[in-house]
Image (cartoon, rainbow, N blue to C red):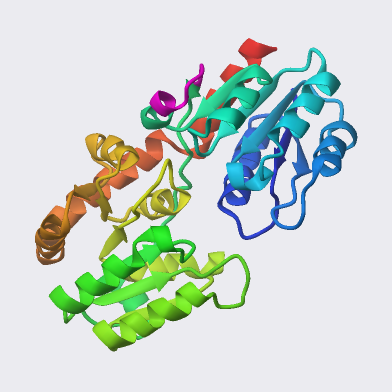
Amino acid sequence: MKVAIVSPWAVRCGISSYTFDLAQALSTQGVDVYIVRLNRFGRKDINYFETLATRRIPKVDLILVEHEYGLYEGGEGAFYGTLRQRSGATPVVTTMHSVSIPIPDEIISENSDAVIVHNKFCQERYAHDSTVIPHGVRQAEPVPRDEAKRALGLEGPVVGMFGFVAPYKGYEFAIRQVGMEFPGVTLLAVGGWHFDLETTYIARMKDLANSLAPGQVRWTGWAEKEMLPTFFGAVDVGLYPNRYATESGSLLTMIGYGKCVLANSLAPVREKEGEGALVAYKNEGEFVMKLEELLGKPELREKYEEGARNYAERNSWANIARKHIELFKELM
């Protein structure tokens, strides 16, 4: 089976990381994978999308498109219209990494033989037929906690956030709560931006941390993969205070490292809470109460760490690749 995946590639991008893990898992199970690189940044006009759909995709058995609205900047009509003309009888599958913008959703649905979403929340919000295949989880072992803390020069309880530092990620909330309610706790902020340059938002968050939680917030900047086992090893409780999410590779990375995670009670989070993968909170009072309990009761953390590992096992990339292959075979 030959599959072409249209996606950003080899850039600092969550969908690029997702594609790498999926492509690797598919290849391990005998699929010939061809990556068709979609530019993550830069100007993308009609000519770009028409060229992408006609000249850059090799002859394959199936075309898989990893879609996110910001990647196409409204160019779905040009890309999918051209792709459908070009592909003929070759099945086209689209994975929707976010949903619910009506016009591109309709274009994608009309020009895809199947649409994949990552959870029931997205399936309910997507106004067309779709198949749920969860976001895969990369299972990894963290460095032992005491060893990791020594390596990073950290002492005492550590809570951690991971991913791109962006306004919707809830950094203001985390910094305020740590500074006001947890004076002996370190917040380890693991992540940066798509580029090495510091954004105005990151600078503002650092100023806020210096003001409300002086000495309590440790910023790592962009984290290379070889450092992640140490960073996650040092974390006692992972935090996910996002204000919005349809699915989250950063959340699943923490789960993949077997971390006990305290997360804002968004719909996709509640689905994982129902599977025992994490702890959810609904408001500031619950956040404080549950974080105090998790930091003070190692046995409770261990329960959720086991739940995280079990979730990661069920949704390993090998299992997720098999679900893709089953769908591909049905379409072919």
* Residue 62, horizontal then vertical, whole percent: 73, 23
Name the side, left or right, on which 153 lies relative to 229.
left
* Image position of 254 (left or right of 42): left
Give the mark count.
0
Was residue 124 drawn as part of the magenta stretch in this picture?
A: yes
Residue extending farthest right:
55
Q: Quadrant of residue 176?
A: bottom left
Residue 78: percent from left, percent from top: 77, 33
To which quarter of the image does residue 151 belong? bottom left
Residue under the image location 53 percent in, 39 percent down: 97
- Check the picture and name the quadrant holding the N terminus: top right
Residue 16 is situated, as x and y percent measured from the top left of the image, at 63, 50
Hey, which residue is sitting farthest front in the picture?
A: 103
Residue 201 vs 279, above or below: the answer is below
Query: Does residue 101 appear in this view?
Result: yes
Against 84, residue 263 (above or below) is below
Q: Of 8 and 156, which appears nearest the observer?
A: 8
Q: Is residue 197 magenta?
A: no
User: Which residue occupies the foreground of this view, 174 or 32?
Assistant: 174
Residue at 35%, 73% in the rendered image: 188
Please give the name of the residue rendered at 81% of the width and 27% of the height, measured from the top-left corner.
82
Instruction: Give the quarter of the figure containing the C terminus.
Output: top right
* 125 up-or-down from 9: above or below: above
Instruction: Look at the image and tell me whether residue 159 can be seen.
Output: no
Write down the region rendered in magenta: 123-130
Main SS type for the magenta part?
A: loop
- Seen in the image, is 319 located left or right of residue 6? left
